[in-house]
Amino acid sequence: MAKPDIHPKWYPEAKVYCNGEVVMTVGSTKPELHVDVWSGNHPYYTGTQKIIDTEGRVERFMRKYGMGDAASKKGEKGNKKK
């Protein structure tokens, strides 16, 4: 036997707000959704991704695995013909 009225109300045209602007409509159990980040302002999708590294982890990783400026300088020295 199925229990009646156990599912929440479905809003097929729920509005998604970001910074006070409607950015899209989706189906949801809430009529309005307020978000801080969406694909229109997320750094990965907009191409403005920045690496925030306060403890030097990225630099240490780059040195450890030979990537970045240190690797290119090292590679240049080793590839010179005598």
Image (cartoon, rainbow, N blue to C red):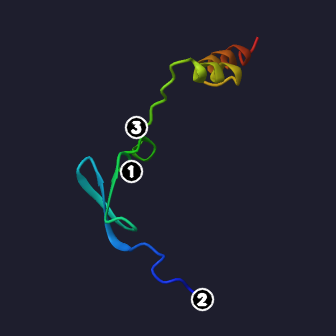
Q: Give the number of the mark in front: 1 or 3.
A: 1
Mark 3 neighbour class, 10 Å CA radius: few under 14, some 14 to 19, many 20 or more: few
Q: Quadrant of the C terminus?
A: top right
Q: Which residue is mark 1?
A: 38
Residue plotted at (35% across, 72% down):
11
Ranked by sequence position, the earlier of labels 1 and 3 is 1
Please state the total of marks drawn on the protein image: 3
Pick the front one: 75 or 50: 50
Residue at the spot of label 2: 1
69, above or below 39, in the image: above
Label 1 vs label 3: CA separation? Answer: 14 Å
Say which of 77 and 26 sits in front.
26
Q: CA distance from mark 3 to mark 2?
A: 53 Å
Tell me the residue at 42%/41% (across/down): 43
Of helix, strand and loop, which one carries label 3? loop
Question: Is 74 situated above or below 13?
Answer: above
Q: Which mark lies nearer to you, 3 or 2?
A: 2
In percent of width and height, residue 77 lies at: 69, 13
What amino acid is labelled 3 in the image?
Thr
Pick whichever of labels 1 and 2 is earlier in the sequence: 2
Amino acid carrying label 1: it is: Trp
